[in-house]
Image (cartoon, rainbow, N blue to C red):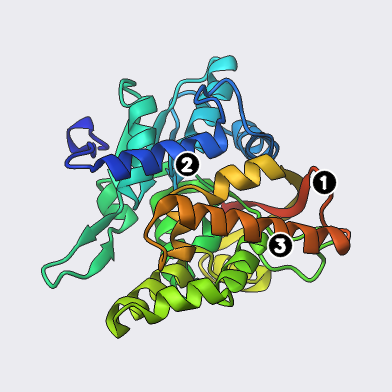
Amino acid sequence: MISAEKNWEPRNLTPEDLADGEAYHRALYPTGSTDVLAGWHGESIIPLVEKAAEFIKTGDIVVDYGSGSGGSAVELLKLLESQNKNIKLVLIDPLPSWFNKAWDLLHFREDVFFRLSSYTDSNGKFKIRTLEEMLESEKVDYIISASTLHLIPPKVYPKLFTEFHDSLKPEGMFFWNSGDIERDDRPKNTVFLHDPYRRVRDLIADDKTYRKKVKQMSEKEAQTTEAVASRIFPPPPTLNVLKDALTATGFVGEIDFKVVTMNREDARRFITVPRLTEIGGAIKEIEEREKLILRNLEIALDEMKKKGQANDSGYRTFWTYGTFMKNT
């Protein structure tokens, strides 16, 4: 049985951790209030939770896998409450700084549970807990994953989707979305969600001042900084790889898509979340790092504007949505 006694609670978080979680929260809710959604967040998350809510019933157990700062959980609970549906919602995420904000928003609720998926083993290696362990072997009705699958290495998909399949009740379902899944049918006037930021990373790597900063670092520090930067916005996985992994692990389902606009102010707010600014990690002074990132973001967006993928207001992103049922 899923128990509140095993809830994760934030401990020993630094002021930098707290600021990181708050910054990402404000990338989704610019004023801090969950009543005011950033345009891209509302456009991308509402279709996902609306689709899930078509199936969810009072008494169901739902997992939000990759909860981050709580944006998907908040919107799902808003919608279900408007429909007078009461559920148990299990939030799962590996990043304490962002997860702390989800805890801050929802820990007072008896129907919401928190499971930190990451831990460090006895050898000091980063590990992810299994879904069975986090759910205490409980079977659940639905799993939702918003804007997360593109951050998971494709080689992990078979194991992860097997865990999803095994943790769902018969006829359980998995709902997901992502703005960063490589697809051949992407309209030419759109890009993937993280394309501007990958371009920013490339521009920074070619910047003379930045290269000078890197050269001033020790070889080990430079390698570590580059390794961290390369993980922030990984190449998008392909839709075929994702679908094949789902099918091979016993899911059947359908794919949909939506074009979502990210305005320039939202893009600036997103890319200046402290953890994401580590794409320019060789610059230690935060204001200097942000200035470099924002200057190159304007270059990236202007390049996309010339290709018809952006305009003065923002850029158009191509999102994929999946609705998959456990095939029994």
Q: Tell me if residue 146 comes above or below residue 244 in the rendering.
A: above
Residue drawn at 67 percent across, 63 percent down: 195
Closer to us: 195 or 209: 209
10 Å crowding of disc 2: few (<14), some (14-19), many (20+): many
Q: Which mark, residue 300?
A: 3
Q: Measure the C-alpha gap from mark 2 to mark 1.
A: 24 Å
Q: Secondary structure at mark 3?
A: helix
- Whether residue 217 is visible: yes
Of pointers 2 and 3, the one earlier in the residue sequence: 2
Depth check, mark 2 against mark 1: the one in front is 1
10 Å crowding of disc 1: few (<14), some (14-19), many (20+): few
Q: Left of 152 or right of it: where is 323?
A: right
Depth check, mark 2 against mark 3: the one in front is 3
Q: Measure the C-alpha gap from mark 2 to mark 3.
A: 21 Å
What amino acid is found at the position of numbered circle 3 in the picture?
A: Ala
What amino acid is found at the position of numbered circle 2 in the picture?
A: Tyr
Q: Secondary structure at mark 2?
A: helix
- Mark 1 = which residue? 312
Closer to us: 195 or 7: 195
Q: Which mark, residue 24?
A: 2
- Whether residue 237 is visible: no
Q: Measure the C-alpha gap from mark 1 to mark 3.
A: 12 Å
Q: Position of residue 158 (x, y in %)?
A: 47, 71
Of pointers 1 and 3, the one earlier in the residue sequence: 3
Q: Left of 105 or right of it: where is 235?
A: right
Residue drawn at 51 percent across, 48 percent down: 272
Of pointers 2 and 1, the one earlier in the residue sequence: 2
What amino acid is found at the position of numbered circle 1 in the picture?
A: Asp
Q: Is label 1 in contact with label 3 (beta carbons under 8 Å)?
A: no
Q: Position of residue 63 (x, y in %)?
A: 43, 42
